[in-house]
Image: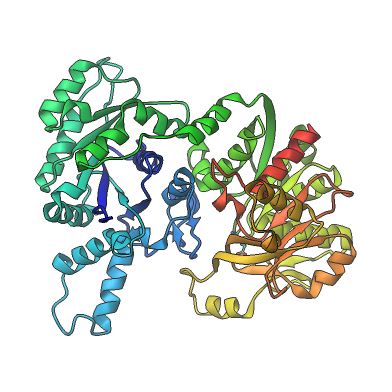
Amino acid sequence: MKKRKHKYIFVVGGVMSGIGKGISAASIGRILKSKGFTVNQVKVDPYLNVDAGNMNPTEHGEVFVMDSGLETDQDMGNYERFLDESASDRDYLTSGMIYYDVINRERSMGYKGKCVEALPDIIDEIYKRFIDAERNDRSDITVVEIGGTIGDYQNIMFIEAARILKIKRPKDVVFVLVSYLPQPSTIGEQKTRPTRIACQTLNSYGVQTDFIIVRSERPFDDKRAKKLAISCNVSEENIISAPNIESIYDVPINFEKGRLGHKLIKTFGIRSKKTDLTCWKEFVKKTKNGKNQLKIAVVGKYFDTGDFMLSDAYISVIEAVKFSSYWQDAKTELTWINSKEYENGKRKVSELKNYNGIIVPGGFGESGIEGVIMVIKYARENKIPFLGLCYGMQLMTIEFARNVIGLKNANTVEIDPDTTHPVIDIMPEQKKLLAENKYGATMRLGAYPAILKEGTGAFEAYLSVRALAKEDKENKNLISERHRHRYEVNPEYIEEMEKAGLIFSATSPDGRLMEIAELPKSKHPFFLGTQFHPEFQARPLHPHPLFNAFIEACLKKK
Ligand code: GLN
């Protein structure tokens, strides 16, 4: 059979940022997948950082890590969650990355002495990245989200590359503008003008949008739809209403009410299966039930910039908790606690008895660390289900060394390089990188295999999910999880810690690196920490086994 030509959907934003362009793109991906297409989702971040790794999470939000180890924007996390697939690192691009590649090529005579310029060389590089999935036969349809808003200076080159693709392949490229209808309280009606200006600006770049997804507080009326159609040059049926809804996971279902999937495919002039969102709807139904209420405390730093950003900094953790809760008919309320408040006496750790579970997520540096260790001690001694993620696992090990074994000064060399008991230490190769100030993309990053120890809590947790998925019994001890850290459990202390009752229930295949630490069920209902970040692989349709086990323990405790 002749292969159908690859198709492209470019999602651009109008009026202002923060209106859900990423979720719109992710929802389009989910819909197309449920119509039987294979989809890859590309995110374009116009900033000059080569990756998101060195960015401050309180300013930029979570750094999402891919299998390959590439550190990306949190939108890639949304794509993976909506598509229920791991994305390729070829699908994430920043202006910095594009320039970096072009400049490196120039430095190694890749342009054979020619003058290298933004136009055409940068545009060509972007273009190549846009069509990467087609060239490598990775999907049927590429959905590209161009970061920023129309009119921004930084994203023009990406729009230009998309325009060129449209000129070359008019039947294979569709533009979707995600826009916003403000409704000022003094006027009381939705205003279309900002969207019309966004369309005009896009026109001035030589691009006519095919669809407009209209974000607003309430659905728009006929009058507004007609006005937008005429002034934006878009057929009325391609103007899709996207009013505020309860949850981001409702968005694909809501788009399908406007038959967006069908209309996109029709624009390409191809046929497809009917949209089948059965599994997705089953999940969404679960999000509305949640008859068991859980209260979980998340303790750490990065919480001191106000409610808005803190949830962005740990978005994958939040979603992972939600997925595992929903599938167990629970709804979990997360309370964010700044650990410094335990240090300065503003809060008492004994308040934690009011929670069904405690999470200590990943982090860096010394601020608030003694407070976190107080919390871990309380969770261990009072048998409150505890999940430590990366730094959370390292601090759990330090707490154990200090308070169970009695190594009073036990610490991580990240905080105290001269500690007499470096239970968390730096690997020699990492030490060299830091001495040379090489911070960019130099941590232990991305997916690494680990071997589970049979009979442990972690093993049971993974096995229950695999048994459901009927996975290969041969590999029942093998897992693959994503990492982002520099420091490790010091092998010199392992024997002593194991003797004292801590179990290292997963290690790297060579046994050198400790991947999971836990207390046995006989000692604690759930006390487990992971050196990796399980949250990066938690998906709505496939919640993560360790989060499942943690939520199960919280429910039991309740
Ligand atoms: N700061 C710790 C390290 O670098 C933990 C990192 C994290 O939690 N992601 O190893």
Q: Is residue 503 visible?
A: yes
Residue shown at 10% from the left, 45% from the top: 204
Colouring: rainbow
Residue 536 location in percent, x, y?
Answer: 55, 52
- The answer to whether 108 appears left or right of 90 in the picture is left
> In the image, 451: left or right of 241?
right
Q: Nearer the viewer, residue 145 or 455?
A: 455
From the image, which quarter does the C terminus lie in? top right
Q: Is residue 202 left or right of residue 336?
A: left
Q: Quadrant of residue 121?
A: bottom left
| Quadrant in which the N terminus is drawn | bottom left
Percent x, y of residue 152: 22, 48
Query: Ligand 1 falls in which quarter?
Result: bottom right
- Residue depicted at x 54% and y 31%: 282
Q: Taking 144 as reference, is 325 above or below it?
A: above
Classify 119 as above or below 103: above
- In the image, residue 513 sits, relative to residue 91, either above or below, namely below
Q: Residue placed farthest to the front in the image?
A: 1
User: Which quadrant holds residue 323?
Assistant: top right
Residue 340 in view of the camera: no
Residue closer to the observer: 462 or 192 = 462
